[in-house]
Amino acid sequence: MAYPSGYGAHGSKHRARAAPDPPPLFDDTSGGYSSQPGGYPAPGADVAFNVNHLLGDPMANMAVAYGSSIASHGKDMVHKELHRFVSMNKLKYFFAVDTAYVAKKLGLLVFPYTHQNWEVQYSRDVPLPPRQDLNAPDLYIPTMAFITYVLLAGMALGIQKRFSPEVLGLCASTALVWIVLEVLALLLGVYLATVRADLSTFHLLAYSGYKYVGMILSVLTGLLFGSDGYYVALAWTSSALMYFLVRSLRTAALGPDSMGGPAPRQRLQLYLTLGAAAFQPLIIYWLTYHLVR
Amino acid sequence: MAFTLYSLLQAALLCVNAIAVLHEERFLKNIGWGTDQGIGGFGEEPGIKSQLMNLIRSVRTVMRVPLIIVNSIVIVLLLLFG
């Protein structure tokens, strides 16, 4: 495309700023990608030098240079504010997925009984991104599953002739509130049981979000095969999800050195895991039974 | 049960208020949950009760001033808009 070298320079500069993370999570595909409708590129004042020779008018050159410097300044300010609340590097780790990972993970969520090795692999004390490790949690599947669930709920309510646009927003916010409550309860449990592993908020959010896949499958089966199909799918996906969660959380809570801790703390962690797993079928049933009357 | 984000905020505010009104001297000491009664040795084993006590004390310390502000705003808004 038109501006490859400018974007390449900016990409390497951006990577040098985040130096301690050696393997880049994403390939730099920003060549030729223009994010602003004005047509001039957003990042880096050095891009302006490549644009200059394309526009013959010196006034336009100055305007483009001025505009791109303003845009880069605004972008830096937004990044600084955003970085104070959410660490973008940690969030990017959860979205570094590819198609093969998503397909295998979905299969694992539906049939986890034959999977042998549940350990998250590390490379030099940094957990491998989901692209290279099937056991790593990701946020892509939960996000997409949540959106699909909201759309599917709208469709199911439309089939029952109970649809209105407010119902869609209500369904989405109800599911979101349940997710927030569950993540808060899990955070409280992790704090009380002094789990020493790196189970951050995003990890718990990822593990809580995997139930939406089961919800979608149950609702789809219920729509296709009636109420009996719904209960069969509910039982199957609930047991698969419970098994998946117990295995994943046990290996994640033990940490990378798999030493565990003293016995009472291990018992607390076991109760926490079992409680989290037992909560899943209840919430799946609660959020979907009104769709498959 | 249809939740909205507003009801979640209301519930969170009420819960944090409930934790903040637990008085240290009159109540927590009487049921053995005072913060100077739980600090055991420097061993590796905090235990669930001391973690809870630490949590209550830190919530009360950290959220005291923001709670005053948020409660005042909510009271004024509820008085005005019902």
Image (tube, coloured by chain):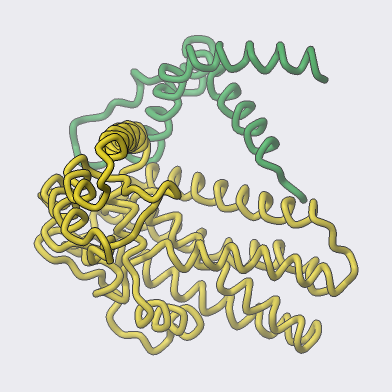
Chain colours: A yellow, B green
As drawn, A266 above or below A113: above
Query: In x, y percent, where is residue B13?
Result: 61, 27
Residue A194 position, x and y percent, is 32, 45
| Residue A126 appears anywhere in the view | yes
Work out whether A285 lies above or below A231.
above
Q: Closest to the observer: B60 or A17? A: A17
Please tell me which residue is depicted at 32% across the width and 45% down the height of the picture.
A42
Q: Is residue A139 left or right of residue A257?
A: right
Name the image quarter holding the C terminus of chain A.
bottom right
Q: Whole-percent x and y of residue B70?
A: 58, 17
Q: Is residue A231 left or right of residue A118?
A: right
With A79 as the anchor, is B61 left or right in this view? right
Q: Residue B39's spot in the image, x, y percent?
A: 29, 26
Q: Residue at x 26, y 29 (%)?
A: B40
Could you say which is closer to the camera, residue A209 or residue B15? Answer: A209
Above or below A91: residue A250: below
Residue at 28% in and 66% down: A1
